[in-house]
């Protein structure tokens, strides 16, 4: 997370709580946020394995926290389910303390086109998007983040050619993708 043990971290879109559990095991104070009450209940089931997290049901576009509250925000595998990504990132920036960090782990642009993601979206109604790296960088810079670093840790490591083709695809497909 880029901050010291004991820091307060917002796990936005915590889902069943695996990321929160890991963060708590690493010594952070964690606030779980998810729009789904059922996911918050599932995340509480792991509280016997680490110091408890504080669950909060909220929409990422309108977080119920004061400005400058968190040392770090983690959004892991959740942003691609959110309809207004720029609004969510602006809210993350608002609730971060000066010098705070945001860590985002999201599927690439190809995820949006994958048959499994499309099937899940049709079956459940859950929004399934993917992101080109440059797309997330623009959103972060537009929200006021200044130091944007990319760390590639996905399942598809590829080559520089694959990265270049993904970048080009992102530029070409971005206007067609749902917001």
Image: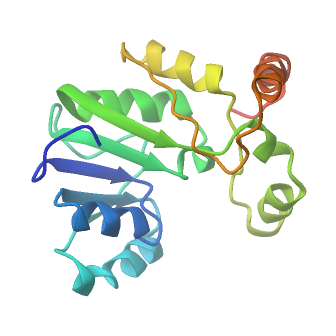
Query: Residue at image x 84%, y 61%?
Result: 116
Query: Residue at image x 76%, y 37%?
Result: 158
Is residue 42 shown left or right of residue 84?
left
Establish if 118 lies above or below 109. below
Instruction: Depth check: give the residue in front, 111 or 160.
Output: 160
Count of numbered circles on the image = 0
Q: Position of residue 102 (x, y in %)?
A: 35, 35
Quarter of the picture holding the C terminus: top right
Q: Position of residue 70 (x, y in %)?
A: 19, 41
Instruction: Depth check: give the residue in front, 68 or 83.
Output: 68
Q: For the view shown, which residue lies furthest in the left direction? A: 6
Q: For the view shown, which residue lies furthest in the right direction? A: 115
Is residue 59 shown left or right of residue 156?
left
Establish if 129 lies above or below 19. above
Is residue 177 shown left or right of residue 30?
right
Q: Position of residue 72 (x, y in %)?
A: 25, 40
Query: Residue at image x 35%, y 33%?
Result: 91
Quarter of the picture holding the N terminus: top left
Q: Quadrant of residue 168?
A: top right
Establish if 47 lies above or below 64. below
Q: Quadrant of residue 159?
A: top right
Instruction: Depth check: give the residue in front, 106 or 152.
Output: 152
Is residue 94 shown left or right of residue 165?
left
Query: Residue at image x 18%, y 32%?
Result: 67
Q: Quadrant of residue 68?
A: top left
Q: For the view shown, which residue lies furthest in the front direction? A: 159
| Figure coloring | rainbow
């Amino acid at each position: 997370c880029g901050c010291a043990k004991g820091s307060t971290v917002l796990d936005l879109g915590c889902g069943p709580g695996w990321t929160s559990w890991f963060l708590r095991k690493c010594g952070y104070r964690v606030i779980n946020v998810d729009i789904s009450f059922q996911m918050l209940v599932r995340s509480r089931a792991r509280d016997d394995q680490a110091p408890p997290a504080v669950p909060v049901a909220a929409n990422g576009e309108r977080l119920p926290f004061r400005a400058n509250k968190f040392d770090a925000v983690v959004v892991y595998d959740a942003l691609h389910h959110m309809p207004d990504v720029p609004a969510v990132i602006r809210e993350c920036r608002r609730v971060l303390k000066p010098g705070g960090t945001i860590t985002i782990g999201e599927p690439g642009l190809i995820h949006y086109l994958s048959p499994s993601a499309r099937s899940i979206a049709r079956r459940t109604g859950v929004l399934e998007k993917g992101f080109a790296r440059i797309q997330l960088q623009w959103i972060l810079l537009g929200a006021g983040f200044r130091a944007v670093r990319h760390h590639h840790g996905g399942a598809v490591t590829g080559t520089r050619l694959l990265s270049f083709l993904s970048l080009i695809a992102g530029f070409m497909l971005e206007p067609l993708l749902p917001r």
